[in-house]
Image (spheres, rainbow, N blue to C red):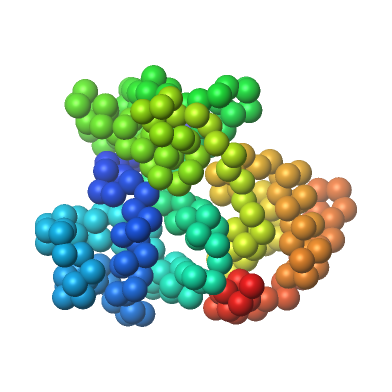
Amino acid sequence: MTVSELPFYGVQLGAGLGLIAETIRLLEVWKPGLGATDLVKAALDSGLFPTMSARRLTNMVVEAFGPRFLSDGGRPAAFLKAVHGGIGAPEFRTLLYIHACRANPILYDFITGVYWSRYASGQASVGKDDAANFVQRAVESGRTRKRWSDTTMIRMSQYLLGTCEDFGLLSSIRSGGKILTFRATMPVVAFLAHDLHFKGLGDNAVVRHRDWSLFGLRTEDVLDEMKRLALDGKIILQTAGTVTHIAWKIKSMEELADVLASG
């Protein structure tokens, strides 16, 4: 892709960073069919956000929760609601991470282009300069609809690091932003593989999809993960050279949610 074909970077990440606790409470309130506007009203009426202003709650739902979890008719929210409490907290947080990255291209590109590059080169941390330089390059290369002010660039670099901290990729930024062990466990691999499959991708496209780079995985690494998924009984995998064939034993994301939630 040329720069003009890439998605523009927005500032929506500032609406809530990781939003882990808030997402869980909003999922308690959310029901199939509720859009962002109705969810705001339901959340205000629920009493689950007693210290949050209506303006703050609206901003969080419209700018963060909605883009992350209410796309595709709310299917991401439905899946998350179904598996919450049935999978481990780290796995659930990682599912939120995938959706946050998909909804925020600036976060996606920072993690795949900076975080994992630092990791691969043996660096111990990702710091303020790394984030600031990334944002500066993005603005200078035309990735924003209009040039951001210096203040906005500083804030966006802070949001990127703060979100990485929220999702467990980095230790406290105040203590240096140390790179932490971060990987896709079996429930996460199962989710991502099936999610891509049920979006209509062919088997080869599934294992080569760029979403795997959110975990620093290359195609050969993904195949290893898929072999583990096959050993776990969720798929039947055949590979020969560059060709991959997968027999998908689970027939819908709803069925996968039931399988994962039941252990």
Tally the marks: 0
Residue 109: horizontal and vertical position, in percent?
46, 37
| Residue 113 visible to an observer of this rendering | no
Nearest the viewer among 23 and 143 is 23
| Residue 23 visible to an observer of this rendering | yes
- Write the residue at 38% across / 42% down: 163
- Write the residue at 57% across / 22% down: 123
Outermost residue, front side:
175
Splitting the image into 4 quarters, where does residue 72 fall? Answer: bottom left
235 to the left or right of 97:
right
* Image vertical order of residue 168 relative to residue 124, above or below: below
47 to the left or right of 160:
left
Say which quadrant the C terminus sits in.
bottom right
Residue 122: horizontal and vertical position, in percent?
63, 23
Residue 237: horizontal and vertical position, in percent?
81, 63
Splitting the image into 4 quarters, where does residue 91 fall? Answer: bottom right
- Write the residue at 25% across / 61% down: 61
* Image vertical order of residue 216 relative to residue 26, above or below: above
160 to the left or right of 198:
left
Residue 164: horizontal and vertical position, in percent?
43, 40
63 to the left or right of 19:
left
- Write the residue at 16% across / 58% down: 52
